Image (tube, rainbow, N blue to C red):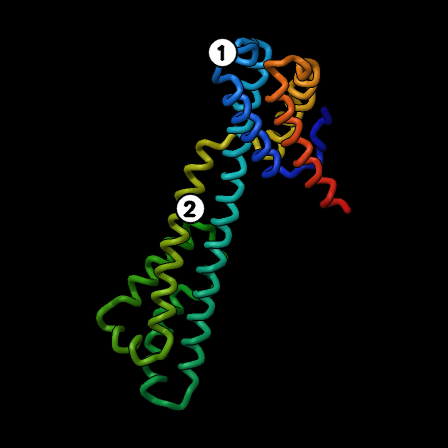
């Protein structure tokens, strides 16, 4: 039985380890040598533990990426809102120019520079900006400028999305252990140095044959994916 190629991606290893754990549970469900094998049980407990850890680590990495994307989205809307108000304030149509100037005086208290603040400070400033733009005295001005009301609504939605992403990030951080890359090394070590050699030794035995052959097939499939990517 071949060992797992070390260049396997983290997500691929996560999937493979999940499959191996599932195969073991299916094979050990009946009363046979597999279910009574304390050595194999110990190895698979390690695999299952590390498989769960790598899943959590991957999720945490993805949550961090989602938070960054949510921040970029709200930053873009703030810039677009500032550009729109500046543009309206320069046009020679008095009604629109006056409305834009009123709104621009409010926007200028915050400015595009709030996009350079840390996450928490920017969130606080955006909430304040949205509260100001929602004032009854500015509703007519907002309605007078095509697209501005939509941008304000988009900023509200983007800020809500950021808040959710931030909550998810905080929860993931609390439960975060090692990085996915670090867990990958430990998991490959257990699989290649313990499980594969053990299954290779017991594969000829009747009770182990089915489990070992299925594990070998899954490892071969994963290795083929890695090898094909390198061509």
Q: Where's residue 103, x and y in %?
A: 34, 74
- Please state the total of marks drawn on the protein image: 2
* Number of the label disc, if any, that sits on residue 134: none
The residue tagged 1 is 31
Instruction: Point out the tag, 1 or 2, that comes first from the N-terminus.
Output: 1
Depicted 188 relative to depicted 124: above or below? above
| Other-residue count near label 1 (Cα within 10 Å), few / some / many at <14 / 14–19 / ≥20 | few
The one of 52 and 124 positioned closer to us in this rendering: 52
Residue depth check, mark 1 versus mark 2: number of the one nearer the observer: 1
* C-alpha separation, residue under disc 1 versus residue under disc 2: 48 Å
Q: Where's residue 196, x and y in %?
A: 68, 21
Q: Residue at x 47, y 67 (%)?
A: 79
Q: Residue at x 46, y 70 (%)?
A: 80
Q: Where's residue 187, x and y in %?
A: 62, 26
The one of 111 and 202 positioned closer to us in this rendering: 202
Q: Quadrant of the N terminus?
A: top right
The residue tagged 2 is 166
Q: Residue at x 69, y 30 (%)?
A: 4
Residue 139 appears left or right of 67 = left
Depicted 36 relative to depicted 229: above or below? above
SS category of the residue bearing label 1: loop
SS category of the residue bearing label 2: helix
The residue at the far left in this view is 136
Q: Where's residue 45, x and y in %?
A: 53, 18
| Other-residue count near label 2 (Cα within 10 Å), few / some / many at <14 / 14–19 / ≥20 | many
């Amino acid at each position: 039985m071949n060992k797992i190629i070390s260049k396997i991606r983290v997500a691929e290893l996560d999937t493979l380890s999940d499959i191996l754990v599932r195969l073991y549970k299916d094979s050990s469900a009946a009363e046979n040598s597999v279910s009574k094998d304390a050595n194999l049980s110990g190895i698979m407990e390690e695999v299952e533990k590390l498989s769960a850890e790598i899943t959590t680590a991957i999720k945490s990495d993805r949550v961090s990426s989602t938070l960054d994307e949510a921040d970029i989205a709200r930053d873009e809307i703030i810039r677009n809102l500032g550009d729109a108000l500046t543009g309206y304030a320069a046009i020679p149509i008095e009604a629109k120019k006056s409305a834009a100037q009123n709104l621009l005086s409010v926007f200028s208290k915050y400015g595009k520079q709030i996009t350079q603040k840390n996450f928490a400070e920017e969130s606080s400033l955006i909430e304040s900006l949205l509260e100001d733009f929602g004032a009854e005295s500015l509703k007519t001005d907002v309605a007078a400028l095509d697209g501005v009301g939509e941008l304000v609504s988009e900023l509200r939605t983007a800020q809500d999305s950021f808040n959710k992403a931030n909550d998810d990030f905080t929860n993931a951080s609390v439960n975060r252990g090692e990085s996915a890359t670090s867990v990958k090394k430990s998991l490959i070590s257990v699989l290649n140095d313990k499980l594969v050699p053990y299954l290779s030794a017991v594969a000829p035995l009747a009770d182990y044959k089915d489990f070992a052959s299925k594990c070998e097939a899954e490892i071969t499939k994963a290795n083929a994916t890695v090898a094909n990517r390198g061509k």
